[in-house]
Structure formats: structure tokens, C-alpha cells
Image (cartoon, grey):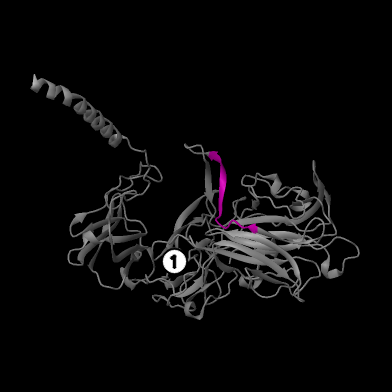
Amino acid sequence: MKNINRYTLQLPVFIALLVLMVLSACKKNKQDFEYDNRVTTDARKSSSLRVVNIGGYGQVIMDGDTLTSFKFAAPTDPANPVFPGTKYFPENGSLGTTWSIPQSLLKGGKANLKTVLGGYNIPSQVLSIDLQETLQATDFYLQMSDNLVGEPVPKYLKLPRDVSAPSDPTKFKIRILNLSALVTRNPDMENLIGPLSLTWADGTPISNKTNNIAPGQYSDYIELPYTTAQLKVLTSAGIQVPGIGSGPFFPATSTLTSGRGWPPEDSRLTFSAFKSFAPGGIYTIVVSPYYFTVPYLIGNPGEAFKDYQNASRIINDISEPLNVTYARVQAVNTLPGVNDVKITMNGQALGNALTYTSHTDYQNYVIGNYTIEAKNAAGNLLATAQVQLDPNTNFTLWLHPDANGKATISPVANDLSGVIPGIDAGDDATYVRNKLNYPFSIRFLNLCPDVPYLTFTKDNGQSFLHNYNRNPAAVNNLRPGIFPIEAPYIQLDYDDMAYKIMAFRSQPGVVPGTWANDIPLLTGKDLIARPELYVRGGLPNHEPGIYTIALVGSTKASAPAGEKAKMIILKHTK
């Protein structure tokens, strides 16, 4: 009986423990559903060696081990076939533009790398490189094959790469590498070989260190404040080298063709992509042969072929850092008749004193809350405002009269991403986002209290609205000091025909309204910063960039000539 009582007393305890174990087991098996969108999900340490593939190589063998898929496009395959990925090349199973060699593939810091250039029923060319890791980060630039360029070039170049952070954390490093080569397959292709220089979008040289870099040479790295810019590469004659990724161009000038009519017109624009250079980033701009689409002018309308020309591209020398610390701010004075205005952020000067319609350069600020003050030459306070700076944001502080004529400061956020929503939705119900690498984006502001409702148009009241411009509030019935936020930019096409920008006095329900013929017109050519950049003669109809066009001044008859209403242009990209 004693034994029976003992087991009976222990039975509830046993059941309780069993229930706890079951509940615990259930809890362990319950997991949150997570996405992991990384291409490479395993822990993989990179060596200091990297391959930069500008020669079109596709396949990789390391110490006899095949790392890529070794599949080639057949004549019956789609135009852009997708091949199965591999462990080291999970995207399309082939070598891309850059590949950081994993440490695990080196034995004692050494390995033999073979890369293969070939295609379906095309004899393969194999390039063999003996690798040796050192403390110096090193790039192996794989160059074009001799049968694609008109002169012998080294199969590859071994170059040092800087991976040390800039001395100023708000800056990035950049250099230029000139691997231009003579391209003779098409005698009509212009000669873009020779010393090359790195410039800003308006053709202004960036630094003496990046000027006149000879073929086969590279410059020192220089440090620049982080920015969104369209960097250009110019020959010694001032001719711009095209960037990769552009549409059809004319071989004699490397300028973009217009999509209208046949034969196509010359836009007089040479493509060069815009990029946001991150603080702490390190970049190399490489010039080397690249294939382009060229119109076949003696063929049928619309026919084109592929040919090679020297072109520039931007290579990230390190994984691009994420900016979580800094924002950029500039200020503009649009108070009629008020000069020598000083703008401060938390008591510190933002640039030099401002005359009417002038602006400061951008300055970098650590994120946080800031008090903005504007004072006149006598030190009297004109206006004050607050702004919260978040990471990677860009603000323009507009000092302007409000609807009642009182001085006010309006911080306006600028979108320099070049990303705009499309009209189609994806599987997750979000709209497709289009990245414009060559934007012609304009935001319009009404800073004139004498015009209660203002509408901007093209020639003869034609609307700016089209496929990418679907928000009428971006241009119609703009009120003084009220800034559209949703889709505030209009986008123009690079090959737009010559156009004017007109101001109309409008009303709700009456658009565009009455032409304000007392306000001078602008044209697309007014967006061209330095006409002398176009050394061949003849100007394009406009120039790419991200702009704000604001109506400032007064329409009153009594206003002095220098304060009459006019449109001013502010370009936010460098």
C-alpha cells in the first residue's frame, strides 16, 4: 500500500512536468517567418584580391575547380537568358564586373585563377593569373581582347587599391584610371584615346591630381565632400568620353541620338550617369573600350549594330558605406532688396553672406535638430525656423516673403535619388520604382506673394505632364510659400525639342490661366551651366540635372528693376 501511495502522489507532478515539456517544445518550434534577400547567405571572408572584369570574361576556374556554370547563350535562347547560379556566382552563374576573391579559395595566400572568354560555338580564350595575397589590396583588371581593339594591350593589369577611410568622414575618395585603347573596327568612330581629365558636370576640372592622366596610367586618390554628381571625363581637346549604359549614339561624336524620326537627330548630349557618392566611399572611374549601339544609317529605318568605343564607368573600390550620420544643407536669399543676409544653423554660419537671389554652397551637418536664423547686415533678426536633419537628406533653406510679405524661412527637402514611381504594381502591391541615371528633373516654387496662384507650362501653355509627370499639383496653381510634397518633380526627356518655360496667373479650376507676360521666359538652354563646355559648337536643348525653378521678386509696377518678378534656377546636383 505504501508503494501505491508513493506513485499516486508523484503522478500529478509527472503530468505537470509532461505538460510543461510539451508546451516548451511547441514554443521552440514556433518561429517568425523571415525573408533573407541576400545573394550570398553564408559567412564568407574576402581576401585583399579582387577581379575587375572590363574585358567581358564570363567563366572562372580556381586551382582546377570550376566555379561558374560554363553555360553559353545559344542562338535559340532569349535575348537575355538567365543561367543557373553557383555557390560563388549565385547570380546568373558567371563572372560579373567585380569579384572579391574569397579567402577560402587561397591556399597559403596563393592560387591560380583562369578566366575564360568565349561563347556558343566560339573558340574560348583562357587567361591564367597566379595570385599572391599581400597586405596591399590589389585589383586585377581584365582587359578587352586584341580582336576587339586596334592595338595590342596587356591581357590584365595588376593595380593597387586604396581601402583606407578618407581623412574626413564626410568625404569620399576617387581616382581616374585611363585604359583607353585605339578602336579601329569602325573607321567612323571618333578617336578618344589620349590624356584624360576628371571634371564636374560643367566641365570644371576637379583637381590637378586627376588632370591629363595618360593611357595606361592612374591618378592618386583625391578626397571630395560627399555629394550627388555627374562626373565627366574629358580629353585634352575638351571632348567628353561617353559613359556606359547609354542609348544609341553617333560614332563620329559619341553624342546621343534622338528617338524621333529617321535618320535620328543629334541631341548634342554625351551620356554620363549621375551617382550619389557616399561619405566614406572609395571609387575608381575607369575608361576602357565598351560596346555601344550605333544606328545603321545606310540601312532600314531603326536598324542598329553594336560597336566599341572608349567609355567611362564607376567602380566601387570598397562596399559602399551607408550614410547614417550626415545631411547636406544650403541656403538661398529671395527677399527682394535685402542683401548681405547671414544664415546660421545653431549659431554657426552657413556659408557666406547672401545677396538677393544668391545661394550658399552645400555644407555637411550631423543629423539632429537645428535652429535656423537669418539676420540682415545690421545684425537684426529677419526670420527663424526649425529643421530636423535625418541621415542622407538634402535641404535647401529658402528665405522668402510669405503670402503676406513677411520674411520667413522654409526648409525644403530635395530628392536627389533619381527614383520615381512607375504606373505598374509588383506582386507585393507596391508600385514599380524607376531609377533615372540621367535625370532632367525640375521642381517649381512660387515665392512671389503678388501671384496668389501660379502655373508653369511649356510653350503656348502646353502641359509638362506626361508618363512620368502625373501630379498636376507639381505645376498647377502653386501658392506663395506652399510647396508640393507628393511627386513634386516633373521629368523631361533628354531629346526634348527646344522649349520655353512660361508662368501663368491661374485660379482653381482655371488652368493654365492668363499668361504672365511681365515675367521673363526661360528656355531649356538656360539650364546649361557653361556653354563653352560644348567645344564642337552648337548647344543641346537643355542639360541634365535636378533643379528647382522658383518665381521670386515683385510684379508691382513700383518695384525697382532689380526686384521685378523673375524665375531663378537652382541646380542641386554637382
In the rendered image, which residue does mark 1 sit on? 281
Q: Does residue 565 appear in the picture of this structure?
A: yes
Please tell me which residue lies in front, 28 or 66: 28
Above or below: residue 352 compared with residue 540: below
> Which residue is most to the bottom?
208
- Please name the residue shown 50% across and 69% down the image: 170
Residue 514 image position (x, y, % from top left)? 84, 49
Q: Is residue 320 magenta?
A: no
Query: Which image quarter: residue 553?
Result: bottom right
Residue 283 image position (x, y, % from top left)? 43, 67
Query: Which image quarter: residue 378?
Result: bottom right
Above or below: residue 477 compared with residue 315: above
Query: Which image quarter: residue 509?
Result: top right
Q: Is residue 234 left or right of residue 359?
A: left
For the record, the magenta segment spans: 412-424
Q: Is residue 259 left or right of residue 317?
A: right
Amino acid residing under circle 1: Gly
Figure quadrant of the N terminus: top left
